[in-house]
Amino acid sequence: MSSALDFMLAARRSEMQGLQALSLTCALVTEVSRLVHALQRERGYSNFCLGGEADSHRESLDALSEAAAEQEIVVRRAFEQIHPESSVGADKARLFTRIAYVLHSLDGLPRLRERVRAESLSAAEATRLFSRQIAGLLAVVFDAADTAVDPRVTRALVALFNFMQGKELAGQERATGVAGFMAGYFDPAVQGKLRFLQDGQARCFESFQQAADAPSLALWQTLCADELLEQIARLRQMAERTSTEQRVQGSLGDVWFELTTQRIDAMKQIEDQLAVHLQKLCAEKIAQAQADLDNQRRLMRQLDKLDHGSADPAVKLYNVQATDFQSLPSEAPGGQVNGSLLDLLHEQTARLQQLQDELEDARQTLNERKVIERAKGLLMKQHGLNEQDAYRALQNAAMERNQRLAEVARTVLSYNDMLKGTSSTAG
Amino acid sequence: MSSALDFMLAARRSEMQGLQALSLTCALVTEVSRLVHALQRERGYSNFCLGGEADSHRESLDALSEAAAEQEIVVRRAFEQIHPESSVGADKARLFTRIAYVLHSLDGLPRLRERVRAESLSAAEATRLFSRQIAGLLAVVFDAADTAVDPRVTRALVALFNFMQGKELAGQERATGVAGFMAGYFDPAVQGKLRFLQDGQARCFESFQQAADAPSLALWQTLCADELLEQIARLRQMAERTSTEQRVQGSLGDVWFELTTQRIDAMKQIEDQLAVHLQKLCAEKIAQAQADLDNQRRLMRQLDKLDHGSADPAVKLYNVQATDFQSLPSEAPGGQVNGSLLDLLHEQTARLQQLQDELEDARQTLNERKVIERAKGLLMKQHGLNEQDAYRALQNAAMERNQRLAEVARTVLSYNDMLKGTSSTAG
């Protein structure tokens, strides 16, 4: 039967497999971020074409569509790498379903492009369809971050996911702003949407900053210090003051587009830096794990020769409450001591525990995000609110109670569970 | 290249694999619970023998040791079922390491038994060594609950884990009480330990009640209504009032042992019921998943024939904030609609999301437990407290602030992260 050594080595192999899978995931995420960027650009130019400027933008649009289609092939190949047949594991159900969604909607892109060129749909509709596609791709990145097994890689994925999402919201703000400025005014609903998109960006970029590597952060700080942001802020304020009575010149649309596009292009550089950092981290982790595994194999072969006779359960595996009063004795009472094997087990347990703790810290943003999304969904369903109003309700409650958004969301969910608890039976 | 259908089916297969692994885990957990019980009994009788009553208990002890050794073989076989070589997956590192620990300390049992019979160690030391062994086995159960992929099975595992741990604390209370009553008094440190063990039981059994199936709950309520508990409560109060000046008769030790043993035996029945429920749930889940998978395969073969041409990204995969203003249009704009595939994807996503939400609810107790353990460990390390005092510090803070223990623990950890954040650089 298998010995303690067998299981110990197997644990290391399992870690190794996790890191290798992670490496594929990181490569995939990098390609997905490129496809998202390509689709964001294609969406922008599709809007111009559908907004009556087809002639002057048609050529650019064709080039962008082609670039997106090429990147799509790269992403499909990356999906193939984590092919369902070759990958085993119980935790892939969500990722696979999300990929199925993405593949299904990618299949619809050629038709969407035809309709854009035939001008058989509105700019708003085209925006919506491209945005859905992008949302699907972002969901894959979220899932990758959520299932990563290494804390530092998870942090890098969290930074990238939040940045990509912030950039996507910036892209949506750009589109909404262009439409409003071109029309000369923003009605209250659209003003609310703009605020919502701005708040969302702030939240995403805050999470990004908490998790980002130093070079990406430095780039971000340079961008934040740029006077570009002041100019955008002035236009945002201007949009707030417009109404059907208070209009502005339509040409501000071009100014707005120009400024926000500069900002988004600068974001792209940061996104690339985040992806570079991610790949580098993955490579380092795998090299290190491989070296550890080789070391341990050697060590274990030696141990295997020594390991005859002694063994003692005086090992703190798991802190069962009240098992211990005294601190752990480092000597093992009774007879010979198989120190080295115990040391190895100790070390491995401590290391895994620390990894787990760090992983949970790294995932905190993701978990809070899930909690907020769930609470929002609940409010939408129970009170018939739209997404924006549900979010606003949570935000107001957080301000009133001087609590963090995630705490308020947790309260909403617990309260709901409590109500459910009273109306249903246990078991 | 793989299609959306391929990945969708793969997602179902992945779920199926998860459930099959779960079935092995549940079988393992059941056997582990039996071994824990056997070791608890052996520990009790070892104490009697080492307490100077070797002659009258030696025979019983031998029988109990033999029973435990037999059950050990069963557990080792169950470990073999989830053999490292045959099991792939990145998430096994912790479980394998814990099993390695258990195997290593099981190897030390024969020596421990020899020492008990040679009376070459104290009762306290023997208790400590047996308790370590049991703590290792409980850690395997905790890990099984923590990595289970189905919410109802997770709930059943959470109920079982908490119950086993409560029972183990009851066993430790029994041993502590026997020693104290036999000595005729309890000093303040031991009284503190008793309170700690009693609080721990209360917490475990509360968590058990939140997650347990109806028949187990009914058995538990019967036990709680039994006058046995009142008698034990009176002895607990009596122990609180003793001191070196205020002694009681040593024969109370026998009374205490008798009563607490009756209670623990009744607990064993509940534990068995919990295990039966767990096995039944697992079997049901697998049968159901298999039927679902067969259904879906059939459905997909039909879809595969239909699926030519249309596809549209108008699907809400993931709630990217601000993607949507309007609610989801159920019609897919533009051309033909491949309704059935979208419906399937929708359904699968919704189902997985719900599973995930339920799973997170079911794991809440486990997560809170981890948070509390981490906070306790931090206090022990930073303030040089022992486990009991660290727990008491958390408990006092919770009472003062009128917060739940887990909330206080979360605050301790965030505060620590904050401090770390100020002294180290990002990245």
Image (cartoon, coloured by chain):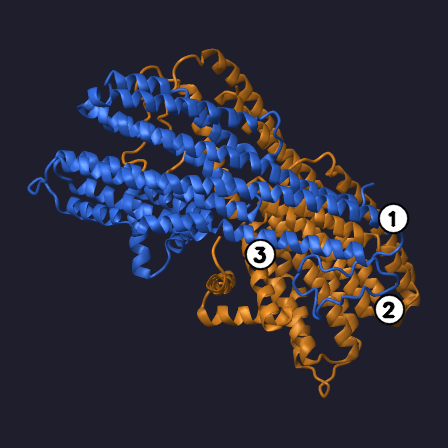
Chain colours: A orange, B blue
Left or right of A39 in this view: A63: right
Q: What element carries label 2?
A: loop
Residue type at numbered disc 2: Leu
Left or right of B57 in this view: B379: right
Discs 1 and 2 carry the same chain letter: no
Q: Could you tell me if the residues under marks 1 and 3 are in contact, i.e. CB atoms within 8 Å?
A: no
Disc 1 from disc 2: Cα separation: 29 Å
| Between B326 and B234, the one nearer to me in the picture | B234
Disc 2 from disc 3: Cα separation: 34 Å
Q: Residue at x 61, y 58 (%)?
A: A204
| Label 1, residues with CA under 10 Å away: few <14, some 14-19, many ≥20 | few
Left or right of A50 in this view: B314: left
Disc 1 from disc 3: Cα separation: 37 Å
Q: Name the residue under label 3.
A: A370
Chain containing mark 2: A
| Mark closest to the chain's N terminus, 2 or 3 | 2
Residue, far left: B245
**Rendered position, A68 above or below B174:** below
Residue type at numbered disc 1: Lys
Give percent across and percent down for residue A309.
40, 13
Give percent across and percent down for residue A347.
45, 29
Give percent across and percent down for residue A38.
79, 54
Q: Is mark 3 on a helix, strand or loop?
A: helix
Left or right of A355 in this view: A63: right
| Image quadrant where residue A335 sits | top left
Q: Name the residue under label 2.
A: A121
Q: Name the residue under label 1.
A: B305
Give percent across and percent down for residue B33.
43, 34
Q: Is residue A26 visible?
A: no
Discs 1 and 3 carry the same chain letter: no
Residue type at numbered disc 3: Lys
